[in-house]
Structure formats: structure tokens, C-alpha cells
Amino acid sequence: MKQQYDVIVIGGGHAGCEAAAAAARAGAKTLLATHRLDTIGEMSCNPAIGGLGKGHLVREIDALDGVMGRVIDQAGIQFRMLNRSKGPAVRGPRAQADRKLYRNEMQRLLGAYENLDIAALTIQDFLVRTVSRETSPAVVGVKAADGTEVGARAVVLTTGTFLNGVIHMGERRIPAGRATTRADDSVEPPALGLSERLYGLGLAMGRLKTGTPARLDGRTIDWDALESQPADARPVPFSFMNDAITVPQIACAITGTTSETHRIIEENLSKSAVYGGAIAGRGPRYCPSIEDKVVRFADRDAHQIFLEPEGLDDPTVYPNGISTSLPEEVQAAFLKTIPGLEAAAVFRYGYAIEYDYVDPRALDATLQVAVAPGLFLAGQINGTTGYEEAAAQGLIAGVNAARRAAAGGGGFAPFRFDRSEAYIGVLVDDLITHGVSEPYRMFTSRAEYRLTLRADNADQRLTPLGIEAGIVGADRSEVFHVKQKALNSARAWASGAGLTPNEAAKHGLKLNQDGRRRSVSDLLSLPNVGLEDLAKIWPEIDEMPESVAEQLAFDALYAGYLQRQEADIVAFKRDEALALPADLDYGAIKGLSNEVRQKLIAARPETIGQASRLEGVTPASMAIVLAWVKKVAPKRAS
Ligand code: FAD
């Protein structure tokens, strides 16, 4: 470890790993400082990556040469494509991980990274210095609990659930960042000093909570009594660098709560940390605790539980769907009422955790804190939940921190995506524009341009931008260009080759008898025609690499919709290009209502587009702001 780095990343979770890797790829001398080296890449809760919306984020991270996709491809023990029966735009790749394999592979990959040092340090504070060209004091390094001081031009903070974290289990409160994965009662320590420092910076902060279920001994579960859920027959890798998955695949099982489970939970609600009033923070609406489900959906007499083995050579089973903060004895009682778990032994009981988060409206689109230049925040600390959301932010913060460092600690060209380019853009824009009132998770429904932003085409959309930004390595560049070449010639062929309805009929393909000749691309856009049908007519299709043929089919399927969406995207981009000066005096703009004025002052949007997405900001008020920026503001400045 040196005494001075370009970028220091605090935290070796999902945001931290991706931030450190991204900063290093961007050319910054980077230090990843985290509590313990053996917990780098640890999955604090469910051992799974991807899912609806989340899988899109992983593909985008991968397209930018990030690490998450490649790691899960080496650690996934049950790959499933969610929503397979629906259109490709809303399909969600998901893989359940072998927890140990995931951690080990992440540690191996980062250990081999150029430009990246890794150190076990507990960071307690930042080094702060007033730099003349910046109005607020800048963060210029970190101070560890053992007194070590390390300087940097930018610091990325990714402390997850550790910031002032408190574990709740019934009436027990334990200051902690999370429980360890060891089968004892040990916990990892919370980050207290950093929390105080962030409050000291005057940032708006709050409390959020999340929870996890008990971990069970799989050898004591009655698997034969349960419905089995196998992996996909042909697992689809997350990474565009991989053609196949070689990790052995396993089956999970499905069970559910019973009316007896619900009775026990209802009778003991007052002992739950959440319902007993001990926790003030809000939890993730889409990942509710079992006590939440029993109360909110009182008419349901069963809730599904997925029993997910945590590893190939690990007997631990994660019962997905019953996270809880009830006391141990209540958990033990209700587990016995669940089919298949009647005799299940418990390795460790579930708990809830409450932690500090920073209102992400304090950040700009590079995830830098406006009042603390040089400090970037990524992950759960920004009010999100989930490994994928954390990793996506880590990548953005890491690249921008590296850019700030390269610019000598001053202004730099932001690395960002807008909402029409990437789910990552949607995520960051939602956070910095609207803030959060509950843990934020990604869904396909959050992306208005989701027909364009598909998981299958993430490389097409983003790898060229990553190459331009200098964060894509030579191997991936090569793979991308080879695929691109094959895709271009496949597209050219598919728009040339074709047949008439009469010719189609000879091959058993029924088309509208309108006499019109249709190209292969036209044919693939028809809902009842697939690649397999056309491969019987044109053997060229079977000779194409599978990823190329599939891309051809998906692009054709969406071509009509995309043309229509194009006009919306052009209008959206026009508003995004209209930048609002950072020092714009909203108080001086005449004609704005007080409510709109206050919203604009609080949010300080970077563009007209971002301003118009603020709740309650009307198109009329945007017209007033725009007119002011064009005419009055420049005159005043001169
Ligand atoms: P983390 O993965 O928490 O990583 C933080 C890292 O920072 C760790 O490596 C830690 O050691 C390090 N660190 C912290 N403080 C310091 C310091 N002062 N000095 C040095 N290093 C430090 N997500 C879901 O999507 N659904 C769920 O249901 C869910 N339930 C959860 C339940 C529990 C009990 C917990 C703990 C988490 C849960 N999560 C859930 C959240 C999920 O774990 C996080 O979203 C994800 O891990 C966030 O990644 P991160 O990188 O922001 O932080």
C-alpha cells in the first residue's frame, strides 16, 4: 500500500468491487480499503444475482467490462431466465450463486487487476482540505481506525448496511453492519465515525431497514415432499464474454407458509422489531418480511417459499420469502409449520437491520456529493437495495472518481448515461432527481424506453461507449468487434434474402396472400415466425453464431416499435441537452410559483429534462425557466 492514490474506494461489497475495478480500468491508481479481505464480494442476504430489471443492470455492467457478470458466470448454480414466455425486453436473467464460489471468484479477479491495491483497513474518517478553486472543502483521503492516513484525489464510499447499522432480532439490538456467514452469533462492526462525518457535512440523511431469513441445514429438510424447481436446460451466461456455463446446476424446491404459520406470526407480532415499534426506518416494499406479508395480505392463507441451496458443497439453505425480525423462539416455532421444514435444523436465525442512508439528491449525475468535492457515494448508502443496483452505481462512481483524479482533482467530463441509453441511467436519474422514501430497487417498468434498453442488446448499446471512455479491455473489445462484424453481415443478408407468400407456402410457411415479397428481417418481425422456421428454408441461419442469430430475431421483432420510440427519444435528448447553470438563481426568476421555486432550489437539476421530471414541476414553469436562462441570466452575468 502506498501513501497516496488517485482513487480510494471504501468497502468491498458489490458497489465497492465494481467501483474499484472501474476506477482501475479507467487508469487510476486505486486502493480498495475494506474491513476484511475474506469478505470481499460477500452476498449479505440472498445468494442470487439478476432478476427482472436487475438482470438488465448486470448485462449493462458487463457491457462496460465490469466484473459482476463474469463472476456470477463462474459461480451460478441455478441459471433461470425469468419471464421467458414474455417478450425479450422484459425477460430477466437470474442466477442463484454458490456464495463461496462467488466471493472467491471476485477476490481472484480483483486480485489480478492492474492498477488496484487492496488493503484490510477500517476507515473511520476522511481527510478534508480546502482547495482554492472549489467552494466547499474537498475530500482528499481517508483515516483508518489504526491511525493510518492515505491520500487520494477522490474517495468512493460504499459502506452498504454498515453506516450506523443496528441488527434487530425481537427485542435484541446489536450494533453491527451485518451478521457474519459463520454459523455462530458473530457480527461485523458498524461504521460509526463515517456516519458522524457525513452528518457533519450537513447532508440530509435518514434510516432504512432490510431483513434476512434464517439459514437452514439442508440435510434436515424433507426434499422428497416438495415440488422441485430445476435450472434452465441451457443456462444463458450473463457475460457477453462467455458462450456457456460450466458450473454444475442444481434444483431448488418450493414450499409455502400455512395457516398455522400465520397464526403463530400474528400472535407474536408485538415481539417483532418492526411491529413492536423498535425500527423507525422503512423496509423494501418488494422484499417484505414475513410478518409484513401476513399483515398486509391478511386474506392469503399461504406465501410461497423458495428453498435455495447456498453452495455445491455447503449444506446451508436459504429459505427465500420469510425474512423476519421476530425472536428466535418464534422463528423456531413457525418454521416447524412449513411443509418440508418440520424437522429442519437452523444454522442461524433471521434478523432485520437498520442503517443510515444519504438522501441521493445530494449527488450529481456522477454520484459526487455536491457539498464535498472528491467524495462519491455508491450502493446501499444511497438508499437502494440489491447487489445489482449497488454494482451499477459503483461503476459510475468509480469511473468518475478516476476522471476527477486525472483532472488533478478539479472539474472533469462526466461519465454518465441518460434514461434513453441505459437502465444505469434510469437508476441514477431516479435517485438524484426524486430521492428515495423506501429502499429503491430496479424494475423494467421504471424504464420508459425499455423496448430499446434490452438485456440482449446491452453490448450493442454500451460497449462502444465504454471503449470510447477507455474502460473496456482489449479482450472484450476484440470479442465485441468480431460479433459486430458477424452481426453486420447477418443484417445485410437478412434484409436481402426473402420470399413471396407463394414461395413461403411451398415451405409450409403461411403468410398473408398479398403478393408482397418479405425479407428475412420482415419475416422475423411476425409474431408467428421464429428462427427455427426460417432455418429450415435458409441453412445460413444455423451457421450463424447463436448470439448473432438471436440478436437478429430480437431486433426484427422490435423494429416497428423502435421506429415509433425514436421520436420520443429525440425529444427527450433535446431537453437533456439543455443544461441549467449550477448557480442559477431560481429566487430571481419571475412568474414561478413558490412551490415550484422551492422544488428547483432543493433539487438543483442539471438539465431542463431533469427539472421537468421533478414532481409538481409543470411544462409552463419549465418554459419560464428556459426563457430566463436564454435571455435574462446571460445579461445579468455580463
Ligand atoms: P455491502 O455489500 O453491504 O458492502 C459494504 C462493504 O463496506 C463491506 O465490504 C464492508 O466490510 C465495508 N465497510 C463498511 N464500513 C467500512 C469501513 N468503515 N471501513 C472499511 N470497510 C467498510 N438486498 C436485496 O436486494 N433484498 C433483500 O431482501 C436484502 N436483504 C438484506 C438483508 C440484510 C440483513 C442485509 C445485511 C442486506 C440485505 N440486502 C438485501 C442488501 C444487500 O446486501 C445490499 O443491497 C448490497 O449488499 C449492497 O451492496 P453495497 O456494496 O452497497 O454494500
Image (cartoon, rainbow, N blue to C red):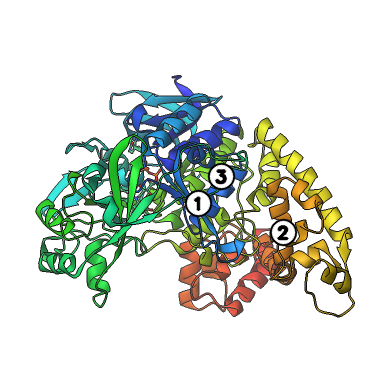
Q: Nearer the viewer, residue 551 or 85?
A: 85
Residue type, label 3:
Pro
Secondary structure under badge 3? Answer: loop
Crowding around mark 3 (Cα neighbors within 10 Å: few <14, some 14 to 19, many 20+) is many
Q: Which residue is mark 2?
A: 531
- Classify 485 as above or below 582: above
Residue type, label 1:
Asp
Q: Which residue is mark 1?
A: 232
Q: Nearer the viewer, residue 320 or 596?
A: 320
Q: Residue at x 65, y 70 (%)?
A: 626
Snapshot quadrant of residue 217? top left
**Label 2 to label 1, Cα distance in Å?**
20 Å
Snapshot quadrant of residue 257? bottom left
**Label 3 to label 1, Cα distance in Å?**
11 Å
Q: Is residue 245 left or right of residue 268?
A: right
Q: Is residue 23 left or right of residue 101?
A: right
Q: Earlier in the sequence, mark 2 or mark 1?
A: 1
Q: Position of residue 525 (x, y in %)?
A: 74, 67
Q: Position of residue 226 (x, y in %)?
A: 30, 57
Secondary structure under badge 2? Answer: helix
Name the mark on residue 237: 3
For the question of whether residue 377 can be seen, the reply is no
Mark 3 lies within 8 Å of ligand 1 (Cβ measured)? no
- Image quadrant of ligand 1 equals top left
Q: Is there CB contact under 8 Å for labels 2 and 1? A: no
